Image (cartoon, grey):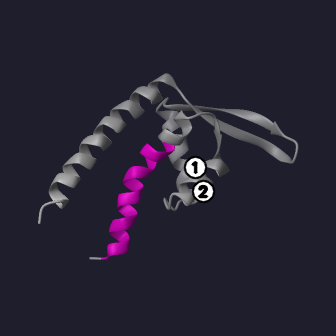
Amino acid sequence: MNVANTQIQMRKGLLEFCVLHIISRGEVYTSDLIEELTQAQMIVVEGTLYPLLNRLKSASLVEYRWVESESGPPRKYYSIKEEGKAFLGTLSNTWDSLVNSTLLITSKN
């Protein structure tokens, strides 16, 4: 088994949760999402993020608006919808439960 592949799968599983959490704090531009995820060592590339954002939009969890830019083409800014807030709340509860369960298991000798 390849540990790097397992690490990638673990990150992918958390990416949607982290992206929704970032967007829930306020309207965000894609490059800002990538920057925050990268700083948190959740390595992500545009080819991964854009399909995820499209899935979240198709599921009516997030929406976007175009904003004209003085330094280039218009930018897409994402914000969370009410359905997204509820979805994120459920994911947060699941995350808390998983963290507690994992700590319970991994803290035993």
Q: Which residue is mark 2?
A: 46
In the rendered view, tell whether residue 2 sits above or below residue 57: below
Let me know if residue 57 is in the magenta part. no
Q: Position of residue 73 (x, y in %)?
A: 82, 45
- In the image, taking residue 7 as reference, residue 66 lies left or right, namely right
In the rendered view, tell whether residue 105 sits above or below residue 69: below
Q: Secondary structure at mark 1?
A: helix
Which residue is at 52% across, 26% downward?
A: 81
Q: Which residues are magenta?
A: 2-19
Q: Residues within 10 Å of mark 2 (few under 14, many from 20)?
A: few
In the rendered view, tell whether residue 21 sits above or below residue 45: above
Q: Secondary structure at mark 2?
A: helix
Which residue is at 53% across, 59% downward?
A: 44
What type of secondary structure mainly makes up the magenta span? helix
Q: Position of residue 16 (x, y in %)?
A: 44, 46
- In the image, taking residue 63 as reference, residue 71 lies left or right, namely right
Quarter of the view holding residue 45:
bottom right
Inter-mark Cα distance, 2 to 1: 6 Å
